[in-house]
Image (cartoon, helix red, strand yellow):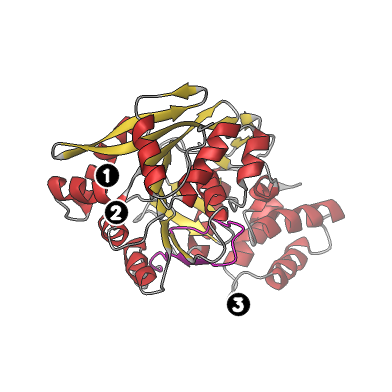
Amino acid sequence: MKADFVERVRSRVINAANGITFASVAAAIRDEAGGVAGDKDVLDALRVLGQELEGAGPLDPLLRDPDTTDVLVTGPHEVWVEGRAGLRRTEIRFANEQSVRRLAQRLAAAAGRRLDDAQPFVDAWLPGGVRMHAVLPPIAPAGTCLSLRVLRPAAHTVDALCRSGTVEAEGARLIQAIVDARLSFVVIGGTGSGKTTLLGAMLGAVPQHERIVCVEDAAELAPEHPQFVRLVARPPNIEGTGGVGVRDLVRQALRMRPDRLVVGEVRGAEVADMLTALNTGHDGSAGTLHANSPAEVPARFEALAALGGLRRSALHSQLAAAVRVILYMRRDGDLRRLAEVGVLQRVGEFVTVTPAWRPGQRLYGRALLEQSLTERGVVPPWTP
């Protein structure tokens, strides 16, 4: 393919008065070819420019792969993908730095966001459940960096998690007991540890006569449940208006007669509204939270509550009353598994997390968990 031919066609298309369409691309190719360009040049130009008009261009095959979780571009010849086999470099190449920049800007525009020299970074959601992050030079001196995270609907069941090794048999009985007892819980873990997968499976185990209203930043949860109602936040448009945040949606969810309220991921000031909601009689509610261990949970809640104007003492009072169980997901290589279950316990003015269960272990917090289950009429899973 002759690069100068493609560039001439691209320049003509960009400057076309009617905007960029497949018709304008075809017309530009005919004009620039002038009967001289060969068939291969014309076809290559159509392919390259077609990639710049729709989808994620050369990254589309990676995003369509059901095993893909992340696609990372750190330069024209540096395209990486993460899936079941871990992070690996691909054979995909961009023509130059400008090609990467154009793709990042087009994706940002598709998400209703701005990405240019005046606004050199963007964090946005693309149609189809892809989270996009991009940084332009000079913030990224080596060239445009583009990160795409693919969010697959979490529709696993508890039985499926057992078969995959995510949850062992006693752990599966325990999470079912937590759901049956209507204990409010939070699933924690690092990025990609399987928090949303476990939460989706537990929501699928909720009795079918109960109504679940879920608030999410992006549509990830898809439990097998007939009364699952989802509200999804909306980012501001390119003018910076029209955004609807998670905090607004939590308030709306309370007016929709939920039996259980779910916040897909607690990451900001909405924690104050969520804890208020959980203290109004919505037993069995749930959410996820980024935390590296159960012991870090109170501090993580404190940091988020400060964003919502909630004092430390008030946060601990509400947290102690609202949430009972912490489920910790951990990623070991390619395996994501339920590593620990803890119980929130108030000690003096503050809340701590007491370990209650690990695979094959009965920890000193087990009595607290047993008490919470039996008070709700549910037999602990390890009772003979």
Q: Is residue 176 above or below residue 167?
A: below
Let me know if residue 12 is in the magenta part.
no
Kindly state the secondary structure of the residue where label 1 is placed. Answer: helix
Range shown magenta: 216-237
Q: Is residue 146 visible?
A: no
Q: Looking at the rendering, which quadrant does residue 215 occupy?
A: bottom left
Let me know if residue 228 is in the magenta part.
yes
Q: Is residue 105 above or below residue 372?
A: below
Of labels 1 and 3, earlier in sequence is 3
Please state which of residues 41 and 116 is positioned toward the viewer in this rendering. Answer: 116
Q: CA distance from mark 2 to mark 3?
A: 47 Å
Q: Which mark is residue 18?
A: 3
Q: CA distance from mark 1 to mark 3?
A: 52 Å
Q: Which residue is mark 2?
A: 271
Please state which of residues 17 and 192 is positioned toward the viewer in this rendering. Answer: 192
Tag 2: residue type? Val
Q: Who's the residue at 14% across and 36% down the image?
A: 348
Q: Which residue is mark 1?
A: 301
